[in-house]
Each structure stands twice: as structure tokens, then as C-alpha cells.
Image (cartoon, rainbow, N blue to C red):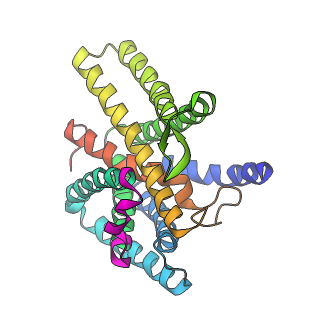
């Protein structure tokens, strides 16, 4: 399994890095759109649709809606607003699972949730490419998510005692969450001191970092919740040794639109 994971990572990494950091404009939107569309194909399975025709149909719907968002950029603020509302609601659903599953038991609800997860993630990345320090913003999002995951893994393994959401993901602990916060907040503070940020600026950056890390946890748990309900371990087997696309981007789908909304509110980029 480890060998398979390494081989898959080595094959995909150049394509992923090139797509994220070398492409711009329409090509970048198309690249991210292809990834998100594959995520739509996987989400249909999590939503309870096993027939290929149904899954391809939902993926096609995702692709059409992405094209619409590309040609109607004035919708971007509303997409981000919907994402923020959704991830606040998702926090409630994860905390209350399995009791809260009655709120998304219907097929239309599950499919709508898929759109609320996938479309804003694409929108946020497209906005990043249009804002100052575009590639740096994308790198910052990835570093935050990866740092939180690494901190959670090692702190959870070493100190994990109190279960975070045992009904959703029994392996995750509060100690892991605090470890992820530590691994991300300390570098943020160091950068702030090095760049001589004001106290207010530094506090806002730390608060934003903490919020992003917590949202990344919610994103991870949300997919775990739907996988548990569907009775499956991975969203697909598209990536040998790694599961599916959604298994690799579950935290990012939550972090990207929230991070974009925070940057927009801070005046970083225009919508």
C-alpha cells in the first residue's frame, strides 16, 4: 500500500503543482474545474447514487454550473456567502450526527450539499488567481491545511485521549486539533513578528488562521460523515493508494471559500 501511495503521488505531483501554480486565466479555471467535476462524480456516490449514469449526470451538472460561474463572475460574492453559511451549518450537522442526518436524508438535499461544497471551492481558487500574490495565496491555503493535518496526526497519535467526533470519525481527537492549531499558529506568529505587523494585524491573522484550521477539520469530518452514512471507506479508487479526489481535497473544499471570504472582507481582493 505504501509503495502504491508513493508511486501515485510521484506521478500526480508534477501535474498538480503545474496546474496550480503555472496556469492562469481560463486554463487554470478549466484545470480546477476538471478536478471539481471528478469530485462531483464521486459525491453522487456519497449521496447514495451508485448507477454510473446518475453519477456522470451529476458530474455534468457540476461542470455546467462551473461554466456558468465563469461567465457570470458577478455571482462570486453570493457563492462565497453561501459557502460560509453552509460550513457553519455543516459544523452543526457534524456535531449532532447521527441525529442530524434527518436534515439531509433526501436525495435532493444530499445533491444540493454536494454543490455547496464543490462550487465555492472552485470559485475561491479562481478568485485567488485574480488577486495580488495569487500563487502565494494558494500556497498559503495548502500550507495551512497540510500543517493542520500533520499537527493533528502526530499530536493525536502521541497525546490523543478525548474523542473529537466519535460517531463520525473515531480516530480523531481534540488533542489532534490542538496540535494542528499549534503547528499553524506558531509560524503565523513568527511571520507576523518578522514582518513587524501591528498588534491588531497580528491578532487578526492569528484569529483567521485558527478559524481556517477549525473549518478544515469540519471539512474533513463532513466527508467522513457522508462516507459513514453511505457505508464506504473511500470516495472512489481513482487515486491508487489514496482513495478518491474528495479524500484528498475534503479539507480544502471547506478552507478555500472561507479563506477567500476572509481575504475579501479584509480588503485583499475585489469582487
User: Which is more toward the observer, 185 or 130?
Assistant: 185
Picture residue at 65% right of the left edge, 66% below the top? 237
Residue 191 lies, in percent from the top left, at 41, 19
Q: Does the magenta stretch include residue 197?
A: no
> On screen, 45 above or below 224?
below
> On screen, 58 above or below 118?
below
Q: Residue 64, located in which quarter of the rendered image?
A: bottom left
> On screen, 9 above or below 115?
above
User: Which is more toward the observer, 46 or 237?
Assistant: 46
Residue 60 lies, in percent from the top left, at 43, 78
Q: Is residue 75 left or right of residue 43?
A: left
How many numbered circles does the render carry?
Answer: 0
Picture residue at 63% right of the left edge, 28% below the top? 158
Q: Is residue 64 left or right of residue 6?
A: left
In terms of secondary structure, what is the magenta stretch mainly?
Answer: helix
User: Which is more toward the observer, 165 or 199?
Assistant: 165
Residue 236 lies, in percent from the top left, at 60, 67
Residue 221 lies, in percent from the top left, at 46, 51
The extreme right residue here reads 3
The extreme front residue here reads 99
> On screen, 14 above or below 98?
above
User: Which is more toward the observer, 171 or 257?
Assistant: 171
Residue 130 in sight: no
Picture residue at 43% right of the left edge, 40% below the top? 141
Part of the protein shown in magenta: 95-110
Q: Residue 33, located in which quarter of the rendered image?
A: bottom left
Q: Is residue 105 magenta?
A: yes
Residue 150 in sight: yes
Amino acid at each position: 500500500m505504501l509503495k502504491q501511495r508513493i508511486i501515485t503521488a510521484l506521478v500526480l505531483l508534477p501535474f498538480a503543482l503545474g496546474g496550480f501554480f503555472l496556469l492562469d486565466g481560463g486554463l487554470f479555471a478549466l484545470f480546477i474545474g476538471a478536478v471539481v467535476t471528478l469530485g462531483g462524480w464521486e459525491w453522487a456516490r456519497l449521496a447514495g447514487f451508485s448507477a454510473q449514469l446518475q453519477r456522470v449526470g451529476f458530474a455534468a451538472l457540476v461542470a455546467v454550473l462551473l461554466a456558468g460561474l465563469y461567465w457570470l463572475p458577478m455571482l462570486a460574492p453570493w457563492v462565497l456567502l453561501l459557502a460560509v453559511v453552509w460550513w457553519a451549518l455543516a459544523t452543526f450537522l457534524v456535531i449532532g450526527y447521527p441525529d442530524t442526518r434527518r436534515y439531509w436524508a433526501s436525495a435532493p438535499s444530499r445533491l444540493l450539499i454536494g454543490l455547496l461544497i464543490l462550487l465555492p471551492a472552485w470559485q475561491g481558487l479562481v478568485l485567488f488567481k485574480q488577486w495580488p500574490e495569487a500563487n502565494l495565496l494558494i500556497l498559503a491555503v495548502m500550507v495551512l491545511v497540510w500543517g493542520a493535518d500533520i499537527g493533528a496526526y502526530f499530536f493525536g497519535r502521541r497525546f490523543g485521549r478525548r474523542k473529537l467526533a466519535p460517531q463520525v470519525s473515531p480516530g480523531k481527537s481534540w488533542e489532534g486539533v490542538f496540535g494542528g492549531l499549534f503547528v499553524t499558529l506558531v509560524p503565523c506568529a513568527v511571520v507576523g513578528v518578522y514582518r513587524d505587523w501591528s498588534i491588531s494585524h497580528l491578532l487578526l491573522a492569528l484569529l483567521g488562521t485558527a478559524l481556517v484550521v477549525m473549518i478544515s477539520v469540519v471539512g474533513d469530518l463532513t466527508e467522513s460523515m457522508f462516507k459513514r452514512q453511505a457505508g464506504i471507506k473511500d470516495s472512489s479508487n481513482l487515486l491508487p493508494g489514496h482513495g478518491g479526489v474528495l479524500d484528498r481535497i475534503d479539507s480544502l473544499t471547506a478552507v478555500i471559500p472561507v479563506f477567500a471570504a476572509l481575504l475579501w472582507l479584509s480588503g485583499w481582493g475585489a469582487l
